[in-house]
Image (cartoon, rainbow, N blue to C red):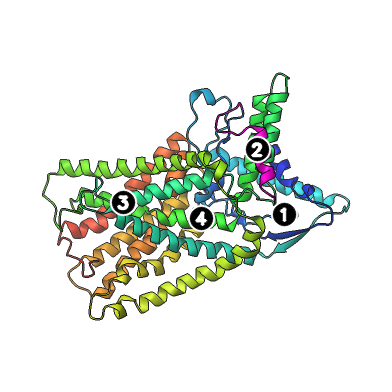
Amino acid sequence: MELKLRQAGNYVTGRVAQSAPGETLSPDYDAPESFKNLHDADEETARVDPAGSARAEEPSSLRARMQRRPSAKGNNSDYDIPDSFANIPELREVMPIPSQDERHTRITPSYEEERTLEREYSSHQNAQRRVEEGEPETEKPKIEEVSRLATEIYTVSYLILFAILGTLARLGLQALTFYVGAPVSFSSVWPNFAGSLVMGFLAEDRMLFRFEWGMPTYELEILRARDNGVDNNDTGDSGPKRAAVDLAAAKKAHMATKKTIPLYIGLATGFCGSFTSFSSFIRDIFLALSNDLVAPDAGPTTTPRNGGYSFMALLAVTITTISLSISGLFIGAQLALALEPITPSLPFTFTRKFLDKFAVVLAWGSWIGAVLLSALPPDRFSNTGAAETWRGRATFALVFAPLGCLARFYASLYLNGRLTSFPLGTFAVNIFGTAVLAMAWDLAHVPFGAVVGCQVLQGIEDGFCGCLTTVSTWVAELTALRRRHAYVYGGASVAVALACMVVIMGSLRWTDGFSSLECKH
């Protein structure tokens, strides 16, 4: 691990030397130290089998691709992200568990080991900077540093934008998968699967942000690692083992940069976290337990059954959702490997110079637009006298969605780094969001209230609670933690959340019962 750390540190700090002296670089983003707490951006395993995996491209083909794809050399920059951003779990990288014959060539640190390595890596970087500051003045590239406030604005704007898009994707996929004769009657499982799949793809991808420093640095290191593995005939730590270390260093450097890019944070934390919903998952578990999980073709009521069948239904919802979500995470990672030859790379200058600024306008404009659509729903004017359903179906959810996403983001920043074996931030938001959804559900299912109030409660459930809680992050953490810690964390999350549901929703269900909604849509 120490060798891997040194390789990564040298690789990161060496990027400035690759630029021509006196060259003016693109903005260097000043970001908080807390960005280190972005769990899903931390490295876990070596992605390419250095011994010659069939998935990895040969050096000749890599060189050919690098020649075909122009680099943005001369525009090097990296976002200066707060250290606490490393606590955000959506940025943690995941990989399928390697087979037994690959364990001797792959480096697979657990989440706890990775957090220790992250701290050592940061200390190494700080020490390296102190050494460089004490060296004699030499001609170095000029870096235009962007303020930390600007970096924070870009990150928050991407989170707002992708929270809205993730909510729309979740509501749309739930509507598409809730149909007569559906093999799975609870439609919340499919957004959780799809969001986890996207999370796995983003974590494993090496092409979208290929020009992380204005040049394809990761591919260059792949070539170097393969050359070491093929050309070095010494014994000991030579050959494939040395290639694995070099490749792990390249991957570490790539991930250390990728998790500081506001666009990547928006995609992983904003979109994937909002696409999935832990509170909806727990709600479906409770509805299965209380025999209130209505199928698309069963009407508003369910057939009475004994407690044993209700317990089996509880297990079915739990096992189906967790297994499909974890499978989606691994499938997404494998898709990133399979599609790597054809995955496009985002232009470096376009992202830094245009997309960041455009996202600020688009995100805040979209949020304001959702507020206006809720105040003046389009169906009020298109079909006068008919029931206004837009607000209950989508617009109120879009108003509350960014609030839930931002709350989850900052909770992860300040809580996830406190205990490496138990991500407190994700646990706290999942439990709190589940409790809020249970209270909103009860208020919406009591025999009084108006249509607008019911629609607001529906917006809180789908928007705020749906984006505050997340399954994609949760399953990514489960696959990254050590096995014993993963069982404790996963079991505690489901048990505590379900207990909250039983206390809050059960108190109404098993006394007065649920009344029909005033705002059916």
The residue identified by callout 4 is 267
User: Cβ–Cβ below 8 Å for labels 1 and 3?
Assistant: no
Q: Secondary structure at mark 4?
A: helix
Q: Are marks 3 and 4 in contact (CB under 8 Å)?
A: no
**Is residue 4 among the parts visible in the rendering?**
no
**How far across and how far down the image is residue 25, in percent?**
75, 58
Whether label 2 touches label 3, CB < 8 Å: no
Q: Position of residue 119 (x, y in %)?
A: 63, 45
Identify the amino acid type marked 1: Asn
Disc nearer the start of the sequence (2/3): 2
What whole-number distance in Å separates the C-alpha atoms at marks 3 and 4?
24 Å
Drawn side of residue 425 relative to residue 277, left or right: right
Earlier in the chain: of badge 3 and badge 4, it is 4
Residue density around tag 4, few if under 14, some if 14–19, many if 20 or more, within 10 Å: many
Q: Secondary structure at mark 1?
A: loop
Q: Which residues are magenta?
A: 51-72
How busy is the neighbourhood of tag 2: few (under 14 within 10 Å), some, or many (20 plus)? Answer: some
Mark 4: amino acid = Leu
Near-viewer residue (447 or 71): 71
Look at mark 1 in the image and give the residue it sits on.
Answer: 76
Query: Mark 1: few, some, or many residues within 10 Å (few <14, many ≥20)?
Result: many
Mark-to-mark CA distance, 2 and 3: 46 Å
| Closer to viewer: mark 2 or mark 3 | 2
Residue 41 appears in the picture as rendered: yes
Disc sitting over residue 62 in the figure: 2
The answer to which of 450 and 121 lies nearer the viewer is 450
Identify whether 198 is placed above or below 4.
Answer: below
